[in-house]
């Protein structure tokens, strides 16, 4: 994005004329390698523009997550091209429920967004930075104000200049200007063609994603594109799961041969839509038991009947291993068994017959077995310790599995691992109540599989009872 700086001619840069197209002119030059510009206009208006990548702007903040998972690929895409007058390809979902929008700083994104709001919405707009009047006249709809709306005022969307982890903490009442810009222009980022010309939306998932994440991504993408009646597909061979495994166990559609540039939205950087409010607050209703092969479901039901019978079970999902090694934080933060035990013991006093524990972490399993001797039921599966990742110099389970199971052994191992994973999720959904460490694909799908809902739910990362 382009930041507005005080005018300085200590270093010579391209001179641009101040006007409605000044940002687009600057971005054309950015694509040629330029980064700073002098801008001159009438009535003594003069300033410098300084370009910075959206991702760099986010990562320069101390509030940006430390996890290396969020430093590998850009979460926040650059916008070299956009059309603020293309009403049909602007998205206003993020503005639902607000009466007004307050902006802290004048810059490229806030100047463009204020124009969009004044043109296409009835929202009141205010700005703390009087330089915004270089771009828009003050009016009944646009006010300059010294007052800063409190965070508790949920009728006003607060748009601040510094990075704010809206998507990481699921707080969309305060946003930074990059995140709001992306929410409004996300359809233009996805395709340069009208959405009504699109037929497919192809998902390309990272090979580090587990099957839970793949299915959650697929389901949430269906939710995101539902209004356009697009068929969501998975690119063949793009995940770490063989296409034969995908088609054997799940009802996911692989991209057909007639998909091409003229009719398909390609989502290579899935994080670009994941970190929108529309995806973070997706209900998950598009994911249910129907996504699984009926024969596979029948096998799991038979097993569940044999293991649980009529017992009252407390389901607990505790992510560890790579969630610890990769430094997951916020809504996805892992939890230590020590910190979880008081609440688990409190709930067990309600008379549960046992605990069904889903975890890929062998240390968590050992600690839980010691704490609840004779009460723990688990699925047999390969488990990991944090030291495994450190010794191998990797941060994700997919990387570790690739090292441990090279060559032809890999697909067969992954198939067994996938089946065991879903046995665990299905048995969790058979439990009366559910406790989980934090937001992850497994917790999302478990809640979706429980059609009648759990009697009680608790999220350790949020330290509160969850009511759906």
Image: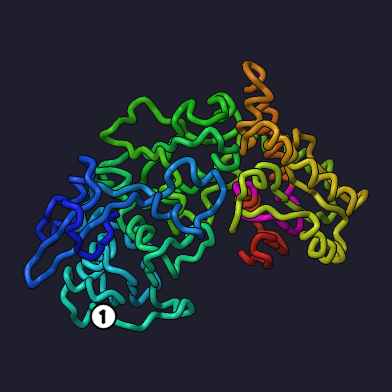
Q: On the picture, is 382 further left or further right than 88?
A: right
Residue, disc 1? 144
Residue 321 picture location, percent across and down = 70, 43
Residue 236 picture location, percent across and down = 46, 27
How many other residues sit within 10 Å of disc 1, few (<14), some (14-19) or many (≥20)? some
Q: Which residues are magenta?
A: 428-442
127 up-or-down from 332: above or below: below
Magenta-drawn stretch contains 429: yes
Residue 119 picture location, percent across and down = 20, 68
Which residue of the protein is positioned furthest toward the right in this rendering?
A: 374
Residue nearer the viewer, 365 or 50: 50
Q: On the picture, is 92 further left or further right than 467?
A: left
Image quarter in which the C terminus is found: bottom right
Residue 249 picture location, percent across and down = 61, 32
172 up-or-down from 140: above or below: above
Image quarter in which the N terminus is found: bottom left
Residue nearer the viewer, 350 or 310: 350
Quarter holding residue 216: top right
Residue drawn at (45%, 62%), measured in percent from left and top?
164
Which residue of the protein is positioned furthest toward the front in this rendering?
A: 10
Magenta-drawn stretch contains 237: no
Residue drawn at (11%, 62%), measured in percent from left and top?
40
In this picture the colour scheme is rainbow
Q: Determine whether the residue tagged by mark 1 lies in a helix, strand or loop.
A: strand
Residue nearer the viewer, 367 or 195: 367
């Amino acid at each position: 994005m382009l930041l507005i700086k005080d005018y300085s001619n200590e270093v010579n840069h391209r001179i641009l004329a101040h006007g409605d197209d000044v940002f687009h002119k600057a971005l054309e030059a950015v694509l040629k390698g330029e980064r700073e510009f002098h801008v001159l206009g009438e009535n003594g208006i003069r300033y410098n523009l300084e370009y910075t990548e959206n991702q760099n702007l986010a990562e320069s903040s101390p509030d940006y997550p430390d996890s290396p998972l969020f430093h590998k690929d850009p979460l926040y895409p650059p916008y070299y091209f956009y059309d603020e007058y293309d009403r049909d390809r602007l998205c206003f979902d993020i503005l639902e429920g607000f009466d007004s929008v307050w902006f802290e700083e004048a810059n490229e994104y806030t100047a463009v967004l204020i124009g969009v709001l004044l043109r296409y919405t009835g929202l009141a707009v205010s700005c703390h930075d009087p330089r915004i009047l270089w771009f828009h006249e003050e009016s009944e709809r646009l006010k300059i104000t010294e007052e800063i709306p409190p965070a508790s005022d949920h009728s006003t969307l607060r748009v601040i200049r510094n990075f704010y982890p809206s998507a990481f903490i699921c707080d969309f009442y305060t946003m930074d200007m990059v995140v709001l810009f992306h929410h409004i222009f996300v359809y233009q980022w996805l395709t340069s063609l009208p959405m009504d010309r699109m037929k497919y939306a192809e998902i390309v998932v990272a090979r580090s994603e587990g099957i839970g994440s793949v299915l959650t991504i697929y389901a949430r993408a269906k939710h995101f594109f539902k209004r356009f009646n697009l068929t969501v597909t998975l690119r063949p061979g793009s995940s770490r799961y063989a296409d034969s495994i995908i088609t054997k166990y799940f009802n996911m559609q692989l991209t057909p041969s007639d998909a091409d540039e003229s009719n398909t939205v390609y989502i290579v950087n899935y994080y670009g839509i994941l970190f929108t409010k529309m995806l973070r607050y997706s209900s998950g209703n598009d994911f249910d038991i129907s996504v699984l092969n009926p024969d596979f479901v029948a096998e799991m039901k038979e097993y569940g009947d044999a293991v649980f019978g009529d017992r009252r079970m407390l389901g607990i999902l505790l992510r560890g291993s790579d969630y610890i090694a990769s430094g997951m934080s916020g809504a996805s933060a892992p939890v230590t068994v020590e910190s979880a035990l008081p609440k688990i013991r409190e709930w067990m006093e309600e008379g549960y017959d046992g605990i069904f524990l889903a975890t890929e972490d062998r240390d968590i399993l050992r600690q839980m077995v010691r704490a609840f001797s004779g009460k723990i039921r688990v699925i047999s599966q390969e488990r990991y310790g944090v030291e495994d990742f450190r010794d191998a110099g990797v941060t994700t389970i997919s990387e570790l599995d690739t090292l441990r199971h090279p060559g032809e052994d890999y697909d067969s191992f992954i198939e067994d691992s996938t089946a065991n994973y879903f046995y665990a999720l299905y048995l969790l959904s058979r439990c009366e109540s559910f406790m989980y460490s934090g937001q992850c694909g497994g917790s999302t799908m478990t809640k979706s599989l429980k059609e009648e809902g759990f009697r009680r739910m608790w999220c350790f990362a949020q330290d509160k009872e969850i009511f759906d």
